[in-house]
Every structure is written in C-alpha cells, then in structure tokens.
Image (cartoon, coloured by chain):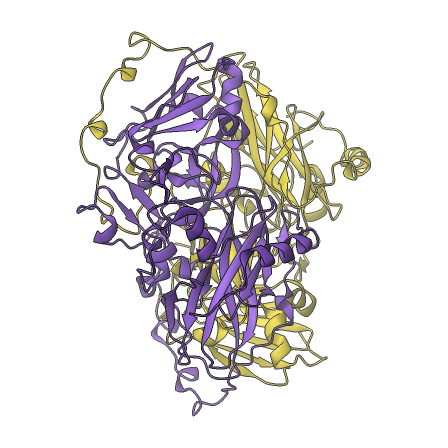
Chain colours: A yellow, B purple
Amino acid sequence: MTKISKASQTEKQQSSRRDFFRKTAAYSVSALAAASVMAPVKINAEDDPAIMEEKKWGTTFGYPVTHNLYGQPSPYEHIVTRRNTKLLSSGNYYASIAMCPIHESMGIITPNGLFFSRSHGGTAEIDPNEHRLMIHGLVEKPLVLTMDELKKYPSVSRIHFIECPANGGPEWRGPQFPSIQFAKGMMSCAEWTGVYIKDILKDLGLKKEARWMLAEGVDNSHMGRTIPIDKVLDDAMIVWGQNGEALRPEQGYPIRLLVPGWEGNLCVKWLGRLEFASEPFYAKEETAKYSALKPSGKAIQHFYANEVNSVITSPCPDKPWTDLKKGDLVEIEGLAWSGMGTIEGVDISFDGGKNWVEASLKGLVLPKAWTRFSFMYKYEGKPLLLSSRARDDAGHIQPTVKHEREVMGVESVYHRNGIFTWEVTAKGEVNNVQVLS
Amino acid sequence: MTKISKASQTEKQQSSRRDFFRKTAAYSVSALAAASVMAPVKINAEDDPAIMEEKKWGTTFGYPVTHNLYGQPSPYEHIVTRRNTKLLSSGNYYASIAMCPIHESMGIITPNGLFFSRSHGGTAEIDPNEHRLMIHGLVEKPLVLTMDELKKYPSVSRIHFIECPANGGPEWRGPQFPSIQFAKGMMSCAEWTGVYIKDILKDLGLKKEARWMLAEGVDNSHMGRTIPIDKVLDDAMIVWGQNGEALRPEQGYPIRLLVPGWEGNLCVKWLGRLEFASEPFYAKEETAKYSALKPSGKAIQHFYANEVNSVITSPCPDKPWTDLKKGDLVEIEGLAWSGMGTIEGVDISFDGGKNWVEASLKGLVLPKAWTRFSFMYKYEGKPLLLSSRARDDAGHIQPTVKHEREVMGVESVYHRNGIFTWEVTAKGEVNNVQVLS
C-alpha cells in the first residue's frame, strides 16, 4: 500500500478551489467534447465479415406491437440485474437486499427494474383500495387518508438518490467483495412523485411541541423510524410515483416516505402511519440497528444524512480494462452523491491519493441526486491505485480511510464514505483495495 | 362552440409577457405550496372500518428478495399500460403503434415499460454481438463500428421527449378519440445515454460538401430518413441507453438515432447505417409518408421540428372529474413540450380561449423535454371548455385550431399543435372537442 498525503492538507487545497467550481443545478458543461476515440477502420468484408451479412432480423417481421405490452429488456441484457448474497440476508431472503448493478448504470436515473431493494419481512403486496395512511399525534386534526384522498394534494416530482446507510458497510475492516455491485450497490436514483409532508400539515395544524415524527410501515416487519421535525418540514415527501409510474411493490407500493439524502431505511416503505411527538420514539430499528458503534464502545444514535461520497464505476472489478491496448483513450466514469447538498466537484487520483486531478461533472447536477463524473484517460498499461474524492456545496469532502478509521474505528456498519480505491493491474484487472496509510 | 379572441391579439399579449416569465433550465418554483386540500376527517372505525383492520400483509411474509429480480409493477396497476388500436395499425400489428398512458404519467420521465412505441415491421430482436454501425459517404475515413467500439466514445445523458409527428394526426378533421391516450399518447420522455454524432465525426473527418445525413435501420422495414447536417452537428446522438438501462428492443436495441425535439421517426431504431451526402436522399418514408399535404394540393417535404404544444392530462376523458364535489380544490395538470427550445410558460382557459390565466411550471424545465404545468382550481360543477396554450423560448406559441386550419387545411396527418380543448360537463365528465371559431 502506498502512503498518501494527509487529509488536512488536501482539505485546505480544496477549500480554496470550492468557489471556483461552484455550479448551478443544471446540465454541467463537461470537457468531454474534446475527446477523440478512433476505432479500427474496417470497411471490407475481410476486415469484419459481419458487415456484409444480411441478418434474419432484416428479412423477417419482428414481433407485433401487441406482444408483451409492458415489455422487458432484451434477453441479451439478462446479466444486468439486481443481485443478492446470503452474506447480507440473515439466513433467509425475506430480510434481505437486492443490489443495483451500478457499473451498468447510465445517466442519473435507475430504472425501476434495477433499483436496489431492501426489506425486513419480504415484499408486501398491498391492495391500494384497502390501504390507509393515518396522520396523528401532535396535530390539531388527526386524519386518515385513502390513496385517492392523498393523491388530491398537488404533487411534486424530484430526482433524488436513496442509499442504504450500510452501503459499503461490510468493508469497514477491509475489502470484502471483488465487485462494485456488492461493494457499493445499495443505492439507486430516481425521479419521485408525491406530496411534501409540510403541505399536508397545513391542513392538519402541527402543534408547536412537535419535534419528531414516527413513520411506520404496514408490512409484517412494521418498520418504524423517527425523523426530526426540521427535516420533515424541509423536504420530506410521501411518494407514490417513481420514474413516471406507480412505485413497484418492492419499493413500498402504494406509498413510501422519502427523506431526501438521508438513510434509506428512513424512507419507510408500505407507509401506514405518521405520528408527531415531542420526543424520539426509539423504535426497534433505531436502537439495535442503524446506530453506529464507536471505538469508545458507545454508539451514535441520531445520525441521518448520507455523507458526501463517490465511486468509480468504470473501470471496476465488474467492468475491467483487460481489453484495452496501450495508447487507447478511455473514459473513467463514476458516481458522486451527497445527502447534504449538491456535488460541487470530484477529483481523481492514480496513485492512491498522493496526487489529484479534477474530473468533469456531466449531465444534470442536482441536489441530493446522483451526479456523474468523467475523466478521459490515455491507457498506458501501468498499475494504478485509482481513487475518487467528491466534495459538496455544504463544504464537505470525503475523508481518507485512515481518517475515517481514526474517528469511527472499524466496528460500525453504517455511513462509510472514506475514499474508495480500485487497484488496476498491469493487465487491466481491477481489484477492490483500501489505502490505509 | 364558443367564439374565441383572435390569435393575433393573444400573440401580442404573450410577447410582452415572455421576458417576464423567462426561466432557467432547473427546477421551477411553483405556486403550488399555497394550496390546501382538506380531506374528510376520519378517525374512528365507524368513519372508515379499514382503519382498524389488520391486513394479511401485516401478518405474513411478503415475497423474498430473490423473487422476480427484475420485477414488474403491482398487479393493481395493470390498467396503466400501452395501448393500440386497429385504426392506426394498417390492418396488422407489425406496422403499428402502442400509445403511452400519458394521463397516468408523473414527473417528466416515462418508464421504459410505458414508453410509446412505433414500428414499421415489428420489433426486431437483435444480437448486439452481431450488430454493426457503418458510417460512410462524404467522410475522410469511412468506418464500421461494433457495439463495444461505439461505446468507447465518452457518453452523454440528456432528458428529451420523442413524439411521433402524427401525434394527434387522426384529428385534423375533428375529434376522434374519447381518450387522451389515443388522442395524444404518441409521445414519451426519457433520459437518453449515448454519443453525439459530432464527436464521432471528429475522428472521421466530415467533408465540407456534406449537407445531409441518411440514417437507416437494419430491421426488415429498413427505415430510412434524411437529416440536415446543421441538426446533426448540433445535438443529434446515437443512443444505447434509456432511463439508465439498455434500450428496450421496441426502442431500437441495441442503438437508435436521437434527433432531439424533431419528428420521432427521424430517431431511426435498430440503427445500422449513417451516410453523408450533398443532397437529400428522398427515402421512401420521407416522400409517400411524413410529408404534409397543404390545401393547395402541394406537400411540404422538409419539415422536422415538433412545434410547441401542450395538453391537459388531468382532467381528461380517461381521468374525469366525476368524483368531485362543488368547492373541492383540485389540481389541473398537463404536459407542455417544444422541439424548438425550452417551455417558457403555459396559459389555461376555462372558456375555450376567450380568457387566459397563467399556470405554474413545476419540476425540471429542460430544453426539448416534457415540462409539467399545474393550476389549482376550485371546482364549481359548471360546464367548462378547458384549454392549454404553451409558449417556448424560441418565441413560438400554440396557434388556435382556426388559425392552424387556415394555414394547413385538414388533409395533413402530421404536426398538429393547435390549442387542445376538453369539454367538462356539469357532471364532471370530460369530452374531446375542438374550438373552431
């Protein structure tokens, strides 16, 4: 393992660059347009016999428009799917997680069929006509809403990521998975449609003693989590739409809570009840679980926001560089995200964090949403320690693994956002490593 | 039918308001937050027995995470699907169209399973390993690319609508469909990932005589269309990704052309060939079809951009107001789009175009993308003629039906963008009508 420069120095360098790279929440202007990737010239059948072949799909009808009206991806894409492992399934697949193939992600939208899914008691299949949402506790007018009544509120649509706070959690003590899908796939990003809770509360009248909100699911795990009132009144939503259609059952159909940027498990699925109170509820899932054990032996209980983070999605163990030749121009691509604001910039290191260069942000740059970064690289066939380091407009920057361990030790499960590093071998193979010094 | 004020007057009013409402391409600030929709108070089992029932999904495991890894919408959403009609299918379902349920759309992303689909010879099922893209004609270095080679170019992701120019085309002579899905569902909007053609052309060297580009598909219809070089070099893309996954087969897997904002059929699916030339190609599909017959008997051949347009999606015949009571506050919602720029504003009329009020834009406002508009309305149970009128930042505004007919007659099929009107009856039923005077 290589030594890296100290976090304090790099943070100082960053703070002076922060204003310069400040961006608005719109399409980012990237430096990509300058890149030139010349493919081998093949214009004769001797170069590539496939050029001259008339394929069967050029001479026969395809399937009619009446076939499979909802549709599926091409059978040739069957390898792009959610995946699970017994290691993260507590011995069964009811309380389990299906991870997103983020190495195959494109843009910032994850299709609903690939959106990561976690449940504590299996996927409930709810009849929306039977479903009710109760809102009570410290409000003037407690209320029970049918789905039709809820949907009468004016809707809003926002693009946000959801990340399980345990994303990367099995790797506090060291690399576990030779795969980005298993190492970082407990997250996805979508356009959500629903209603701000603050808008419903205008009708109900929140009492001024209300400091906390319990959200509870009606599935058999009756998942319960408590949210501070400031966040509820900022941007918490009840959502029924995901990427332009109803939530999928595994995402909480007919409704879930969305707490933008905060721990995925706060986004309670199959949502049935919101209760306002003056004290936290200390529900099962926020005492035994979803608290962070520190080196002192004490645990942090109330922490919520997914900190600024990033990972390089290409190359990665699932998508190595073994087919590259020296001199090839290749795009290094990755995802950055922050539950505390908007991604402001991402740096890339080729030597495990000694030196950094600025990557381009590309596409939409939105608050609490996946943000894609890119760097055009001339491949030389040399071994690399390839790292990314994101910063957000709230002033946060990813810590080194060393710094993260100093603060949190290695006994926690949640909220890992230390700088992530891939080892690229001389052959272009990619391994999951950690730079410790 | 009611009389409406003349188009020249309304256009004059609009031009002075245009600068005032100019918006940046980011989340639009809407006036919705002020709305209050009080639902009936139900807090006892006598009010709603469902409140007190423990449902089966609260006491039994749901399905495990290993079940149906790609997934499907809830069975309770089976009614939300693409639909087709023999009327638009030339007697078979190979050369046909599946229309998008836009009344159920949310936000600006259409999920891939609901994205409208049109083909001229069925859906080709292509093996991407066998697929080749040939780029030739007036370029210095003609080239054939495999999919792997194509994907080495740095990718970009953009949210754009695609609209068939025949969207609404069966209704030039008068209303046909008591349904928004059939009347306006030949369009959808997605996040597309691929490469700008201008970036590939840097490697190939475009000759200066090149004025047109032919795009041709490898499916059995061998769909061919010609695109002017200015548009090719502006923002035309070859795309392989849609909403974060590979294109679906019915969208052209493994690649299609994307010509943002222009006629959907220019976005050639199952794309196999691009040829650059000094003259247009006059392909089959741009002579017999996709030309616009004028009252003079002559046809317009080279017209491409989908003009500024809008439609109210709620209420509509598929989603009427029959469950409303007098005094209810209800959201009027709709979609606006322009192939020539960014939506700047949308007005709503309750009297078929005599008087107009400004709607709010909500969510992301992006160029050549669906843009959602909203207006909170106090329902009074009175008959209405409910119209929407969009304008874009290129200075265009939707014409009246009268004005559109004066220019184009009623014999064309394509490019209808006259102001669309719903008749709302005193009972809240919604009918498809046209205001002619």
Residue positioned 64% across, 47% down in the render? A338
Q: Answer whether residue B294 is visible to the viewer in this image.
A: yes
Question: In which quadrant of the rendered image does the C terminus of chain A lie?
Answer: top right
Q: Is residue A220 above or below residue A10?
A: below
Q: Is residue A219 above or below residue B112?
A: below
Number of callouts: 0
Q: Answer whether residue B107 is visible to the viewer in this image.
A: no
> Which is nearer the eye, B186 or B287?
B287
Furthest residue in direction front, as rendered: B296
Residue positioned 72% across, 28% down in the render? A4
| Residue A231 at x, y percent in the picture | 66, 64
Question: In which quadrant of the rendered image does the N terminus of chain A lie?
Answer: top right
Residue positioned 57% across, 84% down in the render? A142
Furthest residue in direction bottom, as rendered: B46
Residue A50 appears left or right of B263: left
Residue A170 appears left or right of B185: right
Q: Is residue B132 above or below residue A258?
A: above
Q: Quadrant of residue A40?
A: top left
> Which is nearer the eye, B207 or A407?
B207
| Residue A132 at x, y percent in the picture | 45, 77
Residue positioned 46% across, 74% down in the render? B384
Residue B120 appears left or right of A298: left
Q: Is residue B222 above or below residue A100?
A: above
| Residue A363 at x, y percent in the picture | 58, 38
| Residue A327 at x, y percent in the picture | 54, 12
